Image (cartoon, grey):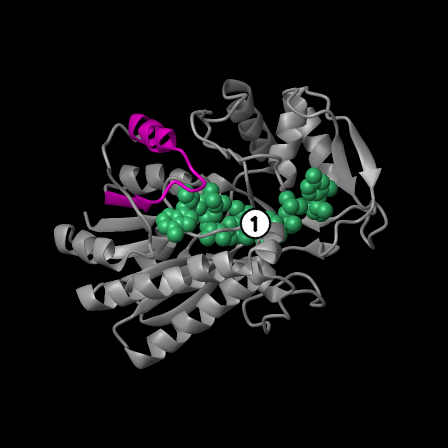
Amino acid sequence: MPLVLVTGGAGYIGSHTLPALLEAGHEVVVLDNLCNASRESLRRVERLAERTLTFVEGDIRDRDLLDRLFREHAVSAVIHFAGLKAVGESVQQPLAYYENNVAGTLVLCQAMQAAGVTRLVFSSSATVYGDGHPMPLHEGLPTGQPTNPYVRSKLMVEEVLKDLAVSDSAWSIALLRYFNPVGAHESGEIGEDPQGIPNNLLPYVAQVAVGRRECLAVYGSDYPTPDGTGVRDYIHVMDLAEGHLCALNALAERQGVNTGNLGTGQGHSVLEVVEAFEQATGQAVPYRIEPRRPGDVAACWADASLAERELGWKARRSLADMMADTWRWQKQNPQGYL
Ligand code: NAD
Ligand code: WQD
């Protein structure tokens, strides 16, 4: 089976995509600088898949390392997860985000081009749609006015990749716009392990449930939504992983850039998520209502029909599955990978 280079493969979404790739018979090389991940995640992936992978500890910005990697490994395609992803941090450290997410991707693509590797799956974000569109969001909509360097970096990379594909018809690129990935592998062996205080809802809920945090702050209950709290399209990370496999397979049959939403097509509010978590786990999640978080939109969910038509992929795991799998990981690993 062809060999796939997975940048950022030790991270949350990357580490959950690896078992799917290995179980499908792919050879895998992971490149990760471990700035937001643990080597342990890869050891556990190998145990789960009962197969080995090649791990290269390094940075996508290191052109010499990339050239050596492409010389030593017959890479057929790249899945590019590597990047910084914290919206708030990007406002404080814009240069780090542009250097890592944009310049890093430029170096990766230059090394790919030099090596004749022209199949790429890129991790983009539903936040590129911005605010103000009626729901559900579909790929034909114009992207919005980004409100922070993180989202701007994703938009910039999307534009770079579109220009690259226009310049050289050999390129086949999938831009995957993730909605809200949550959950963990059903084994509980791998999961989301945020450093410090979690920014995102689900890891925070799980840490309250396991006793690491006192109480969940619900940011805003005065949104124009059914119960006043924010609505998002939560998608199980294993559904997301399977979507990458479908996108990878589709690269072989197409040229140019294809954009796809990876969501369930259904929105759930913060209070619905809390309720679903308590139902699925029997664990109480105390919460208090706080003011809205700056930059949050009221509601965001996908029209996921294009990925179903074009990739033959559809999310199939329920909100209850997402909650139960999140809890199993958190319970079995109260302090994460350590
Ligand atoms: P993550 O931080 O868990 O994974 C990113 C990985 O990339 C980490 O292992 C990190 O060590 C590595 N990395 C970062 N910079 C690197 C560099 N310069 N060289 C090599 N490795 C580097 O994040 P994630 O949640 O798995 O997200 C993966 C991708 O998906 C990111 O590009 C993110 O922007 C995007 N995304 C994530 C979400 C989400 O909610 N998690 C939503 C939309 C898009
Ligand atoms: C979800 C809902 C909050 C935490 C972010 C990034 C986006 C992407 C996905 C990278 C919202 C509410 C949250 C909490 C809360 N990441 N909430 N209390 O903001 O939709 O998207 O992650 O690409 O770029 O912006 O996800 O999980 O932070 O918030 O009430 O402690 O939960 O207000 O309504 P978000 P989130």
On the image, the x and y values in percent for residue 134 come to 71, 66
Q: Which residues are magenta?
A: 26-48
Note whether 244 is above or below 258 in the view shown: above
**Would you name the residue on which mark 1 appears?**
86
The outermost residue toward the left is 72
Note whether 239 is above or below 338 in the view shown: below
**Which residue is found at the position 78% from the left and 31% from the top?**
287
Question: Would residue 159 be counted in the magenta stretch?
Answer: no
Tell me, yes or no, if residue 111 can be seen here. Answer: yes
Residue 182 vs residue 86, the one in the foreground: 86
Tell me, yes or no, if residue 263 can be seen here. Answer: no
Note whether 52 is above or below 115 in the view shown: above
Q: Confirm or reject: label 1 Cβ below 8 Å from ligand 2.
A: yes
Other-residue count near label 1 (Cα within 10 Å), few / some / many at <14 / 14–19 / ≥20 = some
Question: Would residue 27 be counted in the magenta stretch?
Answer: yes
**Which residue is found at the position 63% from the left and 20% from the top?**
210
Residue 17 vs residue 337, the one in the foreground: 337
Q: Tell me: 268 left or right of 195.
A: right
On the image, the x and y values in percent for residue 326 come to 56, 30
On the image, the x and y values in percent for residue 132 come to 72, 67
